[in-house]
Each structure stands twice: as structure tokens, then as C-alpha cells.
Amino acid sequence: MSDFLARALRSLGGALALLLAAALLTAPTASARPQSAAPVPAATLTEVTDFGTNPSGLRMYVYVPANVTAHPAVLVAVHWCTGSGPDMYNGTEYDTLADRYGYVVVYPSVTRSSKCFDVSSPQALKRGGGSDPVGIKSMVDWVAANYSADTSRVYATGISSGAMMTNVLLGDYPDVFAAGAAFSGVPFGCFATADGSEWNSACSGGTVIHTAQEWGDIARAAYPGYTGTRPRMQLWHGTEDDVLRYPNFGEEIKQWTNVKGLGQTPAATDSPQSGWTRTRYGATGDQAPVEAISLQGTGHNLYAYGMAARVLTFFGLDSGGPAPQPQPGGCRVTVTTNAWNTGLTASVTVTNTGTTTVDGWQLAFTLPSGQTITNGWGATYSPASAAVTATNASYNATLAPNASVTIGYQANHTGNSAAPGAYTLNGAACTVG
């Protein structure tokens, strides 16, 4: 096993495997369609083969909603190290949001042993140079050819290795991508290596520091002579990230503000959610040239339900922003637990006390330290410990006003068998009693 693979698996695999463990147990099998059989089936994750130039052997998965628009936007959703395109499909909401807004989602999937995207080689850091970015560009071209996609509305987003690739795609192909959203990434070119290694410890450790001009020049060098419009960028990072250290967040801000011809002083600063600090550069609205969200006390594994809607708002792919969340008091949770020496069961009843129907729900709560869910019913639970999200089953997704649903789980504990003290339903606080 290479030093890089061991490092990636150790640093990234554990947290992100827990994030999606439950979802992967029930992951759908993607159907396969060659290019000649396009377009692909609607509302089904489908693998496409022979999609074009693909020097690094990536696999392409695509999701086309049943109500795809006549000239749809294209969203490239890029997975993390040790992940895959189907993992990204199962672990994010971009497909269900596509059902609402009509865009097409492309899920690139790495086949090399590390399951990390190439963001370090000279080939990857040059427009048309080869490696993964060329294959991803071919995927976009395939969608454009087969669905008459709007090539002015092509976007990229990714988590960890996928966030780094998002930075790379926007640097290599500024004429293709209108905007990007990077969750826990590093600047374009930060991970560059000259010895064939995929891992750059100086960059991951947050010790690669440049001026804004230097970072901008590094990104611009990927496509020499390009003078057209540069993509907008949304950046997300946790202050306690121990895999791709927090200083990388500031370096990304330097790079993309310089690429966009902006200074380092925010046009607006606010806190859209407790513990978040959002800065916007070049404008104050939802589609600012650069938007950066810092999550206080959050580690590398920061992606959570609801963030995808904010990504779509930044991209302009929604119809006016994330759907309004129910106000606190719109839900009530009652919990009954039964504990023994090292285990417990919990029965959780959720009641919609609001006046509108909830169609699709996620109940979030934090387990006490030492508790780990071993199995559950009525919902999918992910991850198995700490901050858990329970997602509805297909048969109980709808909660009419005053309707209730009961779910439950079994867990191990190391001494503290208490029930969680707080719950949120689709991001809104519930009363507990």
C-alpha cells in the first residue's frame, strides 16, 4: 500500500465512511448505458460508457430527472477520497433537488486504487493536459450533446478530494464552468507534486502560503492567454479540519478573489446559521463573485443536509433560494429509552405541529458520547455516532399537519444511556417532551 493511500484511508476513510455507511447499505445499482443508447432513463442513476476522451479511466454516472428542462443546466458533483460517484449520489441531495429544478447531475468516479482525484500532477493542472479533468470535461460535453444542455450554466461542486478537483476544474476550464462550490478543499495548484506522489503534506498541513497575486497567477497559468469571464466560487471550511488544515481556506479566498479581480476586504459579513461566518467579496447578494463560509469548531467532515440548497442558491439553479424551513415549534419529539449494561433501544416519535405538510424529512440529533447506533428502523441513520441524521423511509416520507411518525434504533453505550436532548426537523428546532 502506498504512503498516500494509507494516509488517505486513515485520514479520510473513517469519518466519511461513517457519514454514508447506512446509505451505502441500500445503494441502488446503477444501470449501464453506452453512448449509442442515450438519452439515459429518467430518474435513475445510470452509468454511461464511451462518453469521450478519458485518459485516466474515470467512470461516468448521470442522473437526469423526469422533468428535465429543455436546455438544462449541468451540475458536476465530485466525490471524496475512498468514495465513488454512486456514493456521492447517495450522500448528497443534488438528485432530489434536480427533481425539483430540472438540471442534470454528473457524478465522476475514480478507478485508481486510492479513489482520490488527481489534483497534483502537471497533467491535471493544465487545460487539456490529460488525467481526470479531461475526462470530466468529456462528461460535460456528453450531456451537452445528448440533452442540448445550456453550456453557459455548467457548475461543479465537491467534498474533500472532490473540493480540490472543483478548484482544479475551475482553473483548467474557466470557459466551461460558471461557478463552483468546494467543501473542505485547497487552492488550485496547492497539491502540486513533482515526484509522482498524489499527496502533498505541506499543502494538507496548511503551510503552503502565497500572496493573492501569486495564487491568482498559479490558477491563470492553467490556461495561458485566456481573457474571458472567470467562474464564481463558493468555499466552505471547518476551523478544526485536521485533514486539509484551516489555513487552506484563507489561501483559497486569496486565490479566487484575485482571479476575479477583487480585493481582500469583504463586501458583506454575516452569520446565516449559528457558528457560521459568511463573507462575500465583490457584491453582497446570493451570487457574489466569491462567497466563503467558515464553520466554527467543525472538522473535515462538514457537509450536512441543507447545504446543497445553499449551493444551488449561489449557482442560481433554484427558484429564489432554499425552501423556507418550518419555524421552531413546528415539530414535537417524544423519546422513550430502554437501557441495559452496554446497550439501549430508543423509540422516537416525531409530530408535525405546523400547518403545512412536510414532504420528505430529516431528523437531526446528537448522541451522547460513547453511544453508537448498531441498527435502526423507520429511517436511515448516518453517521452511527455523534451528530446523527435520520432520513425518512419511502413509506413514511410525508407528515401531514398533526401527523406523527415513530422510528427507533438500538445502540451500544459506554455508560451514558441518556436520550439526546435536542432535535431538529429539516433544520428547524423541535420541542421535546
Image (cartoon, helix red, strand yellow):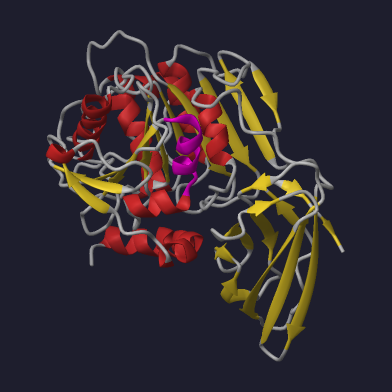
Q: Residue 302 placed where, x, y %?
A: 55, 49
Q: Residue at x 16, y 37 (%)?
A: 51
Q: Is residue 126 magenta?
A: no
Q: Is residue 336 above or below residue 151?
A: below
Which quadrant of the figure has residue 365? bottom right
Observer-nearest of 172 and 142 = 142
Q: What's the residue at 28%, 47% (across, down)?
A: 46
> Foreground: 361 or 18?
361
Q: Nearer the viewer, residue 344 or 261?
A: 344
Magenta: main secondary structure equals: helix
Question: Split into 4 quadrants, where in the image is the C terminus?
Answer: bottom right
Left of 217 or right of it: where is 358?
right
Question: What are the residue bounds of the magenta stretch?
Answer: 92-102
Q: Quadrant of residue 256?
A: top left
Residue pictured at 35% horizontal, 61% vertical: 7
Q: Position of residue 400 (x, y in %)?
A: 73, 50
Does the magenta run of residues contain 96? yes
